[in-house]
Amino acid sequence: MAAMDNPGESQRGNSLLTGDLRRTLFFLALPVLAEQFMNFFVGFVDTYLAGHVTADPDFNRRATSAIGVAAYVGWLSSMMFGLVGVGTTALVSRHWGAGEKEAANRIANRSMMLAVLLGIVACALFYFAAPLLAAAVGLQGASYDIAVRYLQIDAFGHMFHAFSMIGAAALRGSGNTRAPMLILGTVSLLNLIISPLLVFGLGPIPELGIDGIVAGTVTARCCGGLLMLILLSRGISGLKLSVAEMKRGGDDSIRRILRIGLPACVDGVVLWMGHIVFLKIINRIGEDAFAAHVIGVQVEAITYLPAIAWGIAAATMTGQALGNHDIPRARRAGHEAALQCSLLAGLISLFFVLGSEQIFQFMHTDPGVWKTGVFPFRFAGFFQIPLAISIIYMHSLRGAGDTRYPMLINLCGTFLVRVPGAYLCVVVLEWGLFGAWLAMCADILLRAILLAVRHLRGHWVTTKV
């Protein structure tokens, strides 16, 4: 074994393996938290602009619906990239914890090669499938036309988004959460500057309306992907991208990446299909309900993204601890992440419950959207802690390479609770958007319980990667 693969040498000075667990986890999660919030502002700014793009409330409502469909397509692309990203983080962290840095770098290079292929596939898929996607959620007329155009322009940004996401997964596996924060923070800042300029125009810059929203987002994502490629090509945190290493064969790295990532990808794609059905049910209520749902989900990311941040930190520490054969530390990482993030989720719950009316008035100009969305959103505010717990334990299990059990839990929650529950409450009982969100919250609670039980039992510590 090469000198750089000596476990003893690697472990000295690695705070993820030897530092105080609570402090190390907290400071590992902070850069990811900053990154996630900056990433959140991409969707937040786009949704806000859609709600104020013209003085016509009807057009703004249709624009918000288009943004909502694009957000779900973006989620699908993230699930596709998770085919590689989940396996990348699990393997890089496991090799890093064992001191096998050359093997970790090999995984990172194979992952970026797969990112190129997935990015091209995503771009072509979403461009040509845009009409089907808009129709799948029940959009018609002007709303349909706006959504199709938006999705086709947005498709070009997904190719570069693949580079950002999968490169970030490799860096996080090595314990570097700051570089992804800086890159995705740059994406958010560019979007914050470019999109409003293109929407409303300034000086020689023409006013593009809703096309300006998507053009700004695509430009920002392309810059982020290029920055990630440049950073990895120069080498960072022991990971260095090279064309020769990306193309080199002779080992089972790609098979290992895909074996871990495939259940997570299947989980995500099937889950996404369930959510499309869920959206279609909500669309039956009316345009106000659809726009209110889009706003509610976008704002709820204030909980979702911190949970991802602590989940990613837990996944990295879990993988490295298992690579170092420190099973007690691997177990504690997930529990500590759930505890820390639950405290934050409790404060967010309070904000949602008390400020729901002000949130909707800020996000949209149409009083009909406010009236429809405020009460369901206030109700969902009480379920932010279970939401955070479910996300953190899912990431922690995936960090150990246990991706099949979370997949089964998510599928059960979606197709046994959320979708049939929404149909019952919306179509049969006619409870409107509240009925749909009641089913959604029941799904969240079920997942939190089952994933917590899975983590407590500890069978995942024997998962082979």
Image (cartoon, helix red, strand yellow):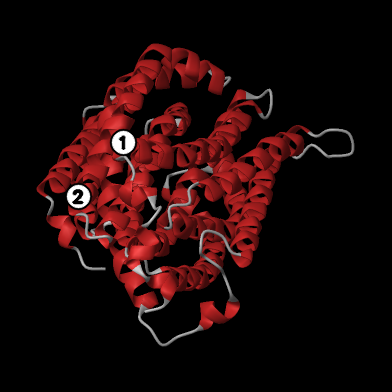
**Residue drawn at x 47%, y 53% as measured from the top left:** 133
User: Picture coordinates of residue 450 (x, y %)?
Assistant: 15, 43
User: Picture coordinates of residue 68 (x, y %)?
Assistant: 49, 39
Q: What kind of element bears circle 1?
A: helix
User: Picture coordinates of residue 246 (x, y %)?
Assistant: 52, 77
**Pointer 1 residue:** 22
The C terminus - image quarter: bottom left
**Is residue 458 found left or right of 257 in the rendered image?**
left
- In this rendering, does residue 182 appear at all? yes
Q: Which mark is residue 401?
A: none
Asked whether 62 or 275 is in front, the reply is 275
Asked whether 40 or 332 is in front, the reply is 332
Q: Are marks 1 and 2 in contact (CB under 8 Å)?
A: no
**Residue drawn at x 55%, y 18% as measured from the top left:** 362
Above-or-below relation of 324 to 149: below
Disc 1 residue type? Arg
**Pointer 2 residue:** 409
Among the two numbered marks 1 and 2 on one chain, the one whose residue lies closer to the N terminus: 1
Above-or-below relation of 184 to 400: above
Disc 2 residue type? Ile
Q: What kind of element bears circle 2?
A: helix
Asked whether 405 or 181 is in front, the reply is 181
**Residue drawn at x 68%, y 42% as measured from the top left:** 190
- In this rendering, does residue 209 appear at all? no
User: Picture coordinates of residue 423 (x, y %)?
Assistant: 25, 38
Classify 10 Å Cα crowding around label 1: few (below 14), some (14-19), many (20 and above): some
Name the residue at the right extreme. 204
